[in-house]
């Protein structure tokens, strides 16, 4: 195999021994383009191999108890993965072509197995999913004759991914649903945290977050103030999602009621660090966190109308930050979080995002813009 470093050394020698620099730079750019193409091909092969392994794993689950053993196929996949890993640092075009050919043969063998056992592929091509960590996994479901049928679990968020499914279930399915499940799960039913849904039209279901809520009419506003510090000081160090312009404060957030298994969470991104203002389900009540607030307590979370989500950043600053601080020029975010949630970072759906103005004034109403492009989606094909 040809070492990538050796290729660059050869190019360097040619460059330093020739006076026609334009031609040599053209040669260098061509070599780099070839290398980039090879690396891109390897990445595509790795994605295809991962999808094939998902198919074989789910096929083995489907065939359990039938006496069919796919261990040889899995061994071949592992061998190909080893070859691919080696190619990322040491490869030639001939090596790459050989792996592509072996993968095609292996895929053909798996296709024959699928056909012979009345099994077909369900392919997921999704965007915008976050990795869930070790405690949770994604699980797909077909709705067949009114009942959920699992299509298998996965943790990788690289797509497309394929899963071997009983043909009759695939043909009868009218809907696809994606849920977030505990990694160790003794409940065979779908969890409450349903993330994506779509009805099949022919061979394809276009899936969206409609099952969480309709975010098309979301809007947001807020003021900077610190009601928990007991004084009119450090007013730019707190943010509250309310609208005071009518005299009596009103909710500053227009958000749909979420389905079970989800909560909203407010964030301020300070110097690149997202800091939570707390989770909530009621836009007209306090949220569930006051860990950064001052000594003046607010009502209990979600306990009383007339109060609103928000936070004063006065105490207990996270590492690398100092409170109080001026929030001018930072970013404010409203995200949608799974509940329970094992991550301290914002989850993918962020329906509202806005920049707090530079030199912002306290007790002045500012708005947050829609950010619907962050919502996950995609297609499922059978």
Image (cartoon, rainbow, N blue to C red):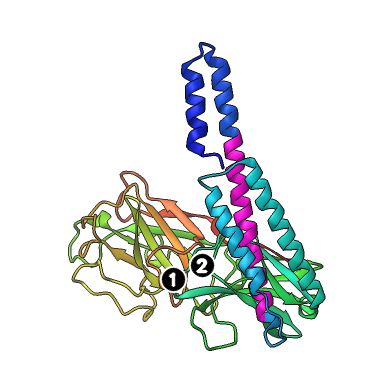
Q: Where the N terminus falls, by quadrant?
A: top right
Q: Position of residue 270 (x, y in %)?
A: 32, 53
The x, y position of residue 183, in whole percent, is 49, 78
Position of 148 compared to 316: left or right? right
Residue 337 lies in the magenta-colored region: no
Q: Which contiguous range is marked in magenta? A: 34-61
Which residue is denoted by mark 1 in the rendering?
283
Residue 298 appears anywhere in the view: yes
Residue on which disc 2 sits: 255
Q: Quadrant of the C terminus?
A: bottom right
How would you rate the neighbour count of disc 1 (Cα within 10 Å): few for under 14, some for 14-19, many for 20 or more?
many
What residue sits 34% from the left and 44% below the top?
358
The residue that appears at 21% across and 65% down in the rendered structure is 316
* Towards the viewer: 218 or 304: 218
Seen from the viewer's position, the closer of residues 251 and 31 is: 31
Q: Element type at marker 1? A: loop
Please report contact status of discs 2 and 1: CB closer than 8 Å, yes or no: yes
Q: Is residue 243 visible?
A: no
Label 2, label 1: how far apart the Cα atoms are: 8 Å
């Amino acid at each position: 195999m040809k070492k990538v470093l050796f290729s660059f050394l050869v190019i360097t020698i040619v460059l330093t021994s020739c006076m026609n620099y334009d031609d040599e730079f053209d040669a260098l750019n061509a070599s780099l383009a070839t290398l980039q193409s090879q690396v891109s091909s390897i990445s595509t092969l790795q994605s295809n191999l991962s999808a094939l392994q998902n198919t074989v794993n789910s096929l083995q689950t489907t065939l359990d108890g039938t006496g069919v053993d796919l261990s040889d196929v899995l061994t071949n996949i592992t061998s190909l993965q080893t070859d691919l890993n080696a190619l990322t640092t040491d490869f030639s075009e001939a090596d790459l072509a050989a792996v592509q050919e072996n993968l095609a043969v292996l895929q053909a063998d798996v296709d024959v197995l699928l056909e012979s056992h009345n099994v077909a592929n369900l392919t997921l091509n999704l965007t915008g999913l976050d990795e869930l960590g070790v405690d949770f996994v994604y699980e797909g479901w077909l709705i067949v004759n009114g009942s959920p049928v699992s299509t298998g679990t996965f943790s990788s968020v690289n797509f497309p991914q394929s899963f071997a499914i009983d043909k009759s279930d695939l043909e009868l399915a009218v809907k696809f649903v994606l849920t977030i499940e505990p990694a160790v799960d003794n409940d065979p039913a779908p969890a409450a945290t349903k993330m994506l849904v779509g009805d099949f039209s022919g061979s394809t279901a276009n899936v969206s977050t409609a099952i969480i809520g309709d975010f098309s009419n979301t809007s947001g506003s807020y003021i900077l103030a610190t009601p928990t510090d007991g004084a009119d000081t450090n007013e730019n160090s707190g943010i509250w999602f309310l609208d005071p312009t009518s005299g009596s404060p009103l909710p500053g957030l227009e958000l749909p009621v979420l389905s079970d298994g989800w909560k909203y969470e407010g964030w301020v991104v300070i110097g690149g660090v997202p800091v939570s203002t707390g989770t909530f389900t009621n836009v007209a009540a306090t949220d569930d966190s006051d860990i950064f607030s001052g000594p003046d307590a607010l009502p209990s979370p979600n306990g009383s109308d007339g109060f609103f989500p928000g936070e004063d950043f006065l105490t207990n600053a996270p590492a690398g930050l100092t409170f109080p601080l001026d929030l001018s020029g930072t970013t404010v975010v409203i995200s949608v979080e799974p509940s329970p949630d094992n991550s301290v970072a914002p989850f993918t759906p962020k329906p509202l995002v806005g920049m707090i103005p530079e030199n912002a004034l306290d007790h002045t109403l500012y708005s947050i813009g829609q950010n619907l492009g962050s919502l996950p989606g995609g297609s499922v094909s059978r």
